[in-house]
Image (cartoon, grey):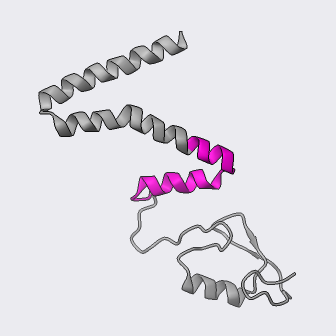
Amino acid sequence: MNCLICLDELNCDPIKTKHCDCVLHIHPDCYYAFLRKSKFRCPICRIKKKRKNELPWPNNLYDFCINILMKLPDPLGFTLLFFTSCLFVALILPFIFFRIQMNRTQAHFFSFIYGYMILLTIKYIFN
């Protein structure tokens, strides 16, 4: 077996990382050089390193969700991405529009009407 980084003959045991379930067929020196030069912890699944003072929950929820979706098999990941995008456009974006374009009273009124229409639609679909 060859090292995944330098492609030389591998004469040591595979490395098991504690951050993922990957078994790396890499020389230890190549792996540590990879860790020093890269922003990832694993060259296979590409888990990003945590920076100092980083919260356990990601600051950018969009990147976190995309990362989870891209780990799924292609048809399932892209289908879920498409449906979540459609749901955002249909359900969340109008509320943001109401809040930005109207004064507070109008925004509350139209948000209530829109929410009630969504509720009626859901009841109609499932009954």
Q: Residue at x 74, y 88 (%)?
A: 6
Q: Give the range drawn in magenta.
A: 58-80
Counting from the top left corner in percent of width and height, residue 25 is at: 79, 78
Residue located farthest toward the top when viewing the structure as drawn: 127
Is the magenta region chiefly helix, strand or loop? Answer: helix
In front of the other: 81 or 64: 81
Counting from the top left corner in percent of width and height, residue 117 is at: 35, 18
Question: Does residue 74 appear left or right of residue 118 in this picture?
Answer: right
Q: Is residue 87 above or below residue 62?
A: above
Splitting the image into 4 quarters, where does residue 26 fall? bottom right
Q: Which residue is drawn at 64% across and 72% down?
A: 42
Q: Tally the marks.
A: 0
Residue 66 is inside the magenta segment: yes
**Quick one: quadrant of the N terminus?**
bottom right
Question: Does residue 60 appear left or right of residue 9 in this picture?
Answer: left
Question: Does residue 41 appear left or right of residue 115 in this picture?
Answer: right
Q: Is residue 49 above or below residue 74?
A: below
Splitting the image into 4 quarters, where does residue 8 fall? bottom right
Question: Does residue 113 appear left or right of residue 36 in this picture?
Answer: left
Counting from the top left corner in percent of width and height, residue 33 is at: 62, 88
Q: Residue at x 58, y 41 (%)?
A: 80
Q: Which residue is drawn at 60% across and 41% down?
A: 79
Residue 105 is inside the magenta segment: no
